[in-house]
Image: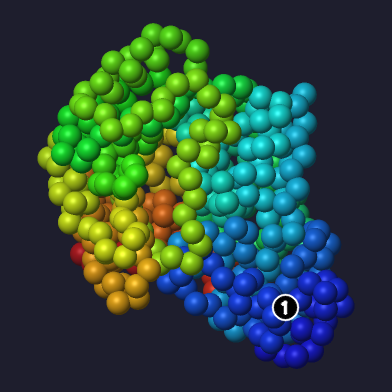
């Protein structure tokens, strides 16, 4: 990289520019997924949108590619690069809540812990990630699943407006009336279109919930999965259940765990949950009334730096034969170095297919998403762990929404190609991405334009 760019950045962001010789370089370049060992030439930590715009213009003039880092959790490693500039937003984590209008203004470097804590002071919440250290920006721009998805929609459905800096250095306010097409694309295909330095989210009252886990030995997976599908078949929109095949207990043993969430007040629904999930002997249970914040923390955190490969599918149904196959494939995993594989089945429906602005989301009509998370430490296990996770997607293909096991939900994609063209993105959306990209980032400051529409199939 041109040394003069680093000098210019130091002028713009004093004492907040880190290059390869800096003592904090390795700390700051580290990512959630240890599979990615990216080495940017420079890392810059701005504190406001004016600095962001100035840094973008300096990078544009120098011909240097810019990558935006929020929480650094993207499993495909999209929050960094090799040899370019990383715009690290970790110093911009402010959240301002207007309880009267039920809105939250959230800076681009905030995490879900930040927004959940600020909104909960007023008994409010919005759809957000279930791992608190995940960045708000990355998860929202890719769609955003959470416990409130079925009742409130995806995280991107709750965005009132965006404030962003695009590759031409302009600071823009984006909403339904100001650049409607960019507003649409930011909902599901928003990675790489610029730096969103502030989101305005619509909040909703969520003072207390019923929630928690029902844990069972893996040998009871068949009746538990049947109970899960029964529970969700006619569930109200304010109820959801994540079904996990995961290690649970002390000592940890392979288990099937139902993580149930209900934000309504109907005691009959609570009784139905209790009755349905009494389908097999339990090894643990903590279901009951609790705060939304405690529910958000219930899945815990995964240490940064472990090796990850995720494989995902969006399904039209979850028949018994598929459920049985998923359990068998899960039981075949495990790398023996203290970190176990996990499968998460998430029901959709409710508010998901009915968004006022569908955006670029390709999985709104799915009934479930299935995520296989291979997590390990030893690089010698790389091929085996990838094969295990891909095996889950191969099993789901007959019931995949698009028939080919595409990574419809980009936040779960491990392969960079799936970030460029997720699932069955329509050619119209793909063309629009190209057109908008040329308009707001004519020099490709944020990297190559999105792929062109697919060529017509041969006759």
Q: Residue at x 57, y 51 (%)?
A: 133
Residue shown at the point (72%, 52%) measured from the top left:
93
| 288 w.r.t. 159: above or below | above
Decide if residue 154 is in sight here.
Answer: no
Work out whether residue 191 or residue 106 is closer to the camera in this orientation and state it: 106
x, y percent for residue 69: 62, 64
User: In the picture provided, is 331 more to the left or to the right than 27?
Assistant: left
Residue 61 image position (x, y, % from top left): 75, 81
Of residues 306 and 373, which is closer to you in this image? 306
Q: Disc 1 on helix, strand or loop?
A: strand
Quadrant of the snapshot with the N terminus: bottom right
Q: Residue at x 57, y 62 (%)?
A: 72
What is the tally of numbered marks visible in this picture? 1
Q: Quadrant of the C terminus?
A: bottom left
Provide residue 237's location: percent of width, then percent of height.
43, 23
Counting from the top left corner in percent of width and height, residue 122 is at: 71, 26
- Position of residue 364 in the picture relative to residue 216 (left or right): right
Front residue of this view, candidates 424 and 306: 306
55 in relation to 414, above or below? below
- Badge 1: residue crowd in 10 Å (few <14, some 14–19, many ≥20): many
Q: Residue furthest left?
A: 321
Residue shown at 35% from the left, 59% from the top = 339
The residue pinned by badge 1 equals 18
């Amino acid at each position: 990289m041109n040394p003069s760019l680093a000098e210019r950045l130091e002028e713009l962001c004093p004492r907040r520019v880190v290059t390869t010789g800096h003592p904090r370089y390795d700390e700051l370049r580290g990512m959630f997924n240890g599979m990615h060992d990216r080495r940017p030439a420079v890392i810059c930590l701005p504190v406001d949108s004016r600095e962001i715009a100035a840094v973008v213009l300096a990078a544009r003039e120098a011909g240097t590619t810019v990558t935006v880092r929020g929480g650094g959790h993207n499993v495909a490693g999209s929050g960094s690069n090799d040899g370019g500039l990383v715009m690290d937003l970790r110093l911009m984590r402010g959240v301002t809540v207007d309880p009267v209008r039920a809105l939250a203004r959230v800076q681009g470097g905030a995490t879900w812990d930040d927004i959940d804590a600020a909104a909960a002071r007023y008994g409010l919440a919005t759809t957000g990630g279930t791992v608190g250290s995940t960045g708000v920006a990355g998860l929202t721009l890719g769609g955003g699943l959470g416990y409130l998805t079925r009742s409130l929609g995806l995280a991107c459905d709750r965005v009132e407006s965006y404030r962003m800096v695009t590759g031409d250095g302009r600071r823009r306010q984006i909403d339904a009336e100001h650049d409607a097409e960019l507003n649409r694309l930011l909902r599901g295909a928003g990675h790489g279109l610029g730096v969103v330095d502030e989101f305005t989210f619509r909040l909703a009252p969520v003072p207390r919930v019923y929630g928690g886990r029902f844990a069972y030995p893996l040998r009871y997976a068949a009746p538990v999965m049947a109970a899960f599908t029964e529970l969700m078949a006619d569930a109200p929109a304010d109820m959801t259940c994540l079904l996990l095949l995961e290690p649970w207990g002390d000592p940890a043993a392979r288990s099937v765990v139902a993580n149930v969430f209900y934000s309504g007040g109907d005691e009959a629904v609570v009784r139905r949950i209790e009755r349905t999930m009494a389908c097999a002997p339990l090894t643990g249970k903590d279901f009951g009334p609790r705060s939304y914040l405690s529910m958000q923390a219930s899945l815990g955190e995964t240490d940064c730096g472990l090796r990850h490969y995720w494989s995902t599918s969006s399904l039209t149904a979850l028949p018994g034969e598929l459920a049985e196959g998923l359990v068998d494939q899960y039981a075949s995993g495990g790398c023996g170095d203290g970190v176990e594989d996990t499968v998460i089945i998430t029901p959709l429906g409710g508010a998901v297919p009915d968004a006022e602005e569908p955006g670029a989301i390709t999985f709104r009509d799915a009934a479930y998403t299935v995520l296989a998370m291979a997590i390990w430490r030893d690089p010698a296990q790389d091929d085996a762990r990838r094969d295990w996770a891909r095996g889950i997607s191969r099993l789901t293909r007959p019931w995949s929404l698009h028939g080919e096991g595409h990574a419809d939900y980009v936040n779960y994609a491990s392969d960079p190609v799936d970030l460029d063209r997720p699932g069955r993105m329509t050619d119209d959306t793909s063309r629009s991405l190209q057109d908008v990209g040329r308009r707001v980032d004519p020099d490709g400051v944020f990297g190559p334009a999105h792929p062109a529409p697919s060529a017509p199939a041969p006759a």
